[in-house]
Image (cartoon, rainbow, N blue to C red):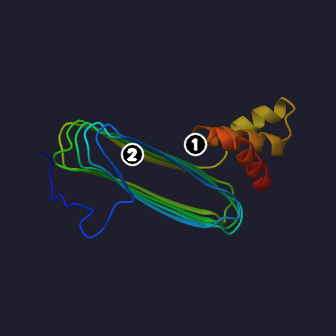
Amino acid sequence: MGYGNYRDPFVGRRPDHVVGAGEKLELTFVVLPGESRDIDVAIDLVGEGAEVSLKGLYLCGGEERVNFRILMHHRAGGCISHQLFNGIAGGTSRVSFDGRIIVAPDAQQTEAYQENHNIVLSEGAHVETTPQLEIYADDVKCSHGATTGRLDEDALFYMRTRGVPEAEAKVLQMISFLAAVTPEDRKEEVEKAVIQIV
């Protein structure tokens, strides 16, 4: 058993999604320019072999306010969760990602992964990311991470030396950055939104 004082996060609160034994849940969140959103998702993996995949993308080019609060609770053993959120913030937008994974004492052989990656396009944009792990079991594979940076100047320079105009090079790099979280049926919509904020 792990260390610390485990507290069930759903005492006095109901999860948004309960995932039972052998069940799979896949959710993808897309926030496009001009949309301000508060996205609060709480998931309880309650049965052995439950799997959850969460993906999200956000494109902010103005004054948007986007907040993600994700609670992933591994109550049962042998469950897997993957979280990947990629976003681009420009203008004077404000983005926050607060992701929390809790692995209960009986949730042995849990696999839980959480990533949040951001590109900031302007000095006025602000991104705050807080990935968190609370592990109370010993036999687990868990990781979390976050990055925040700018567009890759070397890649932009390379594309420009090959005749690609600067604005188009930025668009290509941004589309590539978002590709892993872009739903297949919304690719065209996301590409148009990227062009809108360049």
Residue at left 58%, top 38%? Answer: 180
Residue 178 placement, left or right of 73: right
- Which amino acid, mark 1? Val
Q: Position of residue 125 (x, y in %)?
A: 64, 63
Residue 149 visible here: yes
Secondary structure of residue under mark 2: strand
Residue lying furthest top? 162
Residue 90, quarter of picture: bottom right
Residue 91 placement, left or right of 76: right
User: Which quadrant of the figure contains the N terminus?
Assistant: top left
Q: Position of residue 47 (x, y in %)?
A: 26, 43
Label 2 Cα crowd, 10 Å radius (few <14 / some 14-19 / many 20+): some
Residue lying furthest left? 1
Query: Of callouts 2 and 1, which one flags the residue occurring earlier in the amino acid sequence?
Result: 2
Q: Position of residue 169 (x, y in %)?
A: 78, 40
Residue at left 78%, top 33%? Answer: 159
Residue 195 placement, left or right of 3: right
Question: Front-most of 116 and 111?
Answer: 111
Judged by depth in the image, the label closer to the viewer, 2 or 1, is: 1
Given contact means CB atoms under 8 Å apart, are the residues at marks 2 and 1 in contact?
A: no
Residue 38 placement, left or right of 178: left
Query: Where is 192 relative to 155, above or below?
Result: below
Query: Where is 33 relative to 74, above or below?
Result: below
Residue under numbered circle 2:
144
Which disc, if any, is residue 181?
Answer: 1
Cα separation between marks 2 and 1: 17 Å
Secondary structure of residue under mark 1: helix
